[in-house]
């Protein structure tokens, strides 16, 4: 953790401070160390200032506070979260790494991990841990970076307008990536336009380049005067895709002649590989390629970094349980990610069984969003009534897929799938689902799990194990 002198804290926050010394900042009394300064954060249901005594008992040298002075060595501030952000911004400016901000309705954590895998081939790189992508997670990310960090990758999440703008103000990204603007959080924001506006807040303090998915809504609201690069799967020629592997050609958009014709040729039409499947994973990797080139990396370095990428927990996590091949992609779900991931699974795996659960935060049209997923998958993989659209060959995959739905909303996905002639079983909970799998499915089946995090699909896996 980065240490700050009292003079640096004074400069960062404007607080009136006397004395000397260097301190780490801690916001958690459970992990605070002797000599730390305790910064009490506040939320809807908690007030960290109520625990200043516990921080001091654990060895804290002093505290920040907004109300009553809790101890002799205490620093008065107006708002502790703002103080935390100001201190993080001070560190960002002091050590001055190149900062990459990553946001999007889906795929942002995967994209962040891919960018990290590429960039760390050449640079000392630090990233947001897991999906700790709110303003507190941003501060934790900055304050935990080694002082010699050259590139800092910050994932930015949001639940409403203004949240990404707040993080961006203090992160001051050099590069920004927007993976997409889809229907995740539409229940909170009301429309896709509002979602796109919220994602494009990442440009408010952007210094150099925006790299964004090529969609009409992002082009519409990306009000940024600097360089803008838009990418999509349509820019790619896929050479090979199979379970656990993708190979593709990505010809970068033809740039200006500033680098000379030789540099242009070397940057176009290169072959890349990923040790994961899925068109959406290929699409996510394109921003990592673009960032790599913007930072002056060679083709070999970028290619090596992409090949080294591995998905994190609950994102296409494969395991064998009692003869069943389980692929768990249930970390989160929205209509776009569910369509993409299920399509990839059904195109690549034999004896397919798909378990789909409720998708959350879709607002008043949540039933229609679930039906839309069912219609889309039914048209692609069903028996009828869309033979002119269907692109699934059941003979190559061991038969038509079986679908299991879990939850009241996922049941609507199943209703649309049944209209297309597919076999669907619907369940109310995870226990019923796991019981059905054990009693009715044959060993050797490959089972794919996709749902929002609240569905706790890991319970299905645990029931199968036990």
Image (cartoon, rainbow, N blue to C red):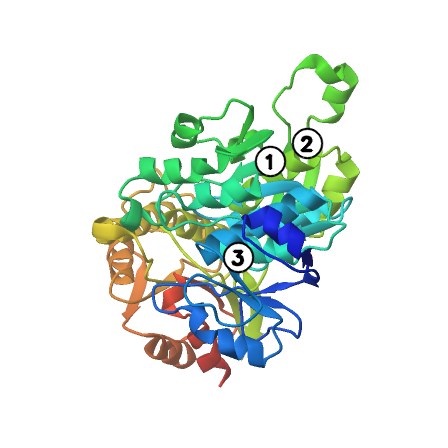
User: Image quadrant of residue 342?
Assistant: bottom left
Viewer-side residue, 65 vs 129: 65
The tag earlier along the polypeptide, 3 or 2, is 3
Above or below, 348 against 212 in this view is below
- Residue 164 x, y percent position in the rendering: 45, 44
The tag earlier along the polypeptide, 1 or 3, is 3
The tag earlier along the polypeptide, 2 or 1, is 1
Above or below, 129 against 171 in this view is below
Q: Which residue is mark 2?
A: 294
Mark 2 secondary-structure assignment = helix
Contact (Cβ within 8 Å) of mark 2 with mark 1: yes
Q: Which residue is mark 1?
A: 175
Residue located 28% across and 40% down the image: 191
Q: Which residue is mark 3?
A: 137
Viewer-side residue, 294 vs 390: 294
C-alpha separation, residue under disc 1 versus residue under disc 3: 19 Å
| Left or right of 49, for residue 264 | right
- Residue 205 x, y percent position in the rendering: 52, 34
Circle 3 or circle 2, nearest the eye: 3
Residue located 45% across and 48% down the image: 106
Point out the image quarter for the N terminus: bottom right
Above or below, 164 against 462 in this view is above
C-alpha separation, residue under disc 2 versus residue under disc 1: 9 Å
């Amino acid at each position: 953790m980065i240490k700050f002198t009292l003079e640096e804290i004074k400069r960062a926050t404007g607080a009136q401070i006397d004395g000397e010394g260097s301190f780490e900042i801690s916001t958690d009394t459970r992990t605070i160390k002797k000599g730390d300064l305790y910064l009490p954060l506040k939320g809807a249901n908690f007030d960290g200032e109520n625990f200043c005594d516990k921080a001091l008992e654990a060895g804290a040298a002093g505290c920040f506070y907004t109300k009553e002075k809790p101890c002799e060595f205490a620093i008065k501030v107006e708002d502790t979260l703002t103080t935390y952000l100001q201190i993080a911004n001070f560190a960002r400016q002091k050590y001055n790494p190149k900062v990459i901000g990553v946001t999007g309705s889906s795929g942002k954590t995967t994209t962040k991990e891919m960018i990290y895998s590429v960039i760390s081939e050449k640079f000392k790189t630090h990233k947001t841990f897991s999906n700790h992508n709110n303003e507190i997670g941003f501060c934790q990310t900055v304050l935990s970076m080694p002082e010699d960090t050259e590139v800092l990758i910050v994932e930015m999440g949001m639940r409403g307008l203004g949240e990404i703008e707040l993080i961006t103000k203090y992160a001051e990204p050099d590069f920004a990536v927007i993976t997409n603007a889809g229907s995740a959080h539409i229940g909170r924001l009301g429309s896709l336009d509002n979602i796109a506006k919220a994602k494009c807040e990442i440009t408010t303090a952007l210094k150099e380049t925006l790299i964004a998915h090529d969609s009409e809504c992002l082009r519409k609201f990306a009000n940024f005067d600097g360089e803008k690069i838009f990418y999509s799967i349509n820019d790619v020629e896929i050479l090979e895709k199979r379970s656990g592997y993708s190979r593709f050609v990505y010809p970068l958009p033809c740039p200006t002649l500033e680098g000379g014709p030789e540099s242009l040729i070397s940057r176009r039409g290169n072959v890349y590989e990923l040790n994961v499947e899925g068109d959406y994973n290929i699409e996510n990797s394109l921003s990592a390629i673009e960032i790599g080139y913007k930072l002056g990396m060679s083709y070999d370095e970028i290619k090596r970094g992409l090949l080294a990428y591995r998905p994190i927990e609950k994102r296409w996590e494969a395991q064998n349980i009692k003869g069943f091949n389980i692929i768990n992609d249930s970390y989160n779900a929205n209509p776009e990610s569910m369509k993409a991931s299920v399509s990839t699974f059904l195109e690549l795996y034999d004896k397919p069984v798909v378990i789909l659960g409720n998708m959350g935060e879709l607002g008043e049209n949540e039933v229609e969003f679930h039906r839309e997923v069912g219609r889309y998958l039914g048209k692609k993989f069903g028996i009828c009534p869309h033979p002119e659209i269907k692109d699934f060959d059941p003979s190559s995959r061991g038969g038509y897929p079986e679908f299991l739905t879990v939850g009241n909303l996922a049941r609507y996905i199943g209703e649309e799938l049944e209209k297309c002639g597919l076999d669907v079983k619907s369940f109310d909970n995870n226990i019923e689902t796991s019981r059905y799998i054990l009693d009715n499915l044959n060993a050797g089946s490959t089972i794919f799990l996709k749902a929002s995090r609240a569905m706790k699909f890991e319970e299905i896996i645990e029931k199968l194990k036990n």
